[in-house]
Amino acid sequence: MSHLDAVGSGDTTARADRHATGGVPVRRLTVLYDADSELCTFVREWLARQSQLVPLVLVAAGSERARVLFPTLDHSATLSDITVVGDSGQVYRGAGAWVVVLWALREHRALAHRLSTPAGARVAKAAALAAAKWRGAQGGDHRRGRRTYQRPDGWSYDPSLGWIHSPPGCDSGACSTG
């Protein structure tokens, strides 16, 4: 039986779900979202209204709560890309995070199964990139009153200046000099 045959067919769906998580049951997912992004807060509100098969805990990325819950996570990266953390420590980012969130929702689990195939993964990645592009166009960084998009690797986009690279500083003296 193929993976697509298993979708929506009772017990085989549960077995496919367990296989996808390495046999570890997922009992809760924490979605880290950018509270300063209109798109992210809209999606957060939409998720809160959905019927959930797996409970979603919605936490602002980079917040004190997120840092306490996940002390080893790169919190600057969670502000630039959707990040979902499973209750057993699984970390999903980007398109994979979107798929696992859809998998947690009653009305969208079948779609998540379709997006987890090789062809579906391309669709999921394209959708995640489109959302990131739209988010960036809306001004991904409102914290400083500017409509810029910041990435953790030092690149930022300012609509009036274009892409700018500001590498991390070497204030600690730990940077290589040659």
Image (cartoon, rainbow, N blue to C red):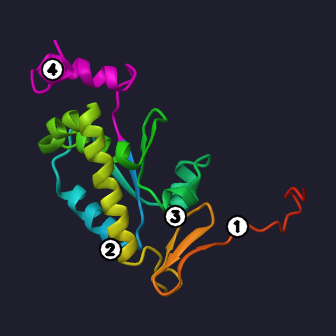
Amino acid type shown at disc 1: Pro
Residue of label 2: 38
Q: CA distance from mark 3 to mark 4?
A: 39 Å
Q: Are marks 2 and 4 in contact (CB under 8 Å)?
A: no
Marks 1 and 4, the one that precedes in the sequence: 4
Q: Is residue 146 left or right of residue 118?
A: right
Q: Earlier in the sequence, mark 2 or mark 4?
A: 4
Q: Are marks 1 and 2 in contact (CB under 8 Å)?
A: no
Q: Rounded to the nearest whole Å, what is the CA distance between mark 1 and mark 4?
A: 48 Å
| Residue bounds of the magenta highlight | 1-28
In reply to whether residue 58 is colored magenta, the answer given is: no
Q: Residue at x 9, y 21 (%)?
A: 9
Question: Please, is residue 131 above or below residue 50 in the view?
Answer: below
- Taking the spot 54% from the left edge, 56% from the top edge, the residue there is 77
Q: Examine the rendered structure and indicate whether residue 4 appears above or below residue 151.
A: above
Circle 3 Cα neighbour tier, 10 Å, few/some/many (<14 / 14–19 / ≥20): some
Q: Amino acid at mark 2?
A: Glu
Residue 131 placed where, x, y %? 31, 62
Earlier sequence position, callout 3 versus callout 4 = 4
Numbered badge on residue 167: 1
Which quarter of the image is occupied by the C terminus?
A: bottom right
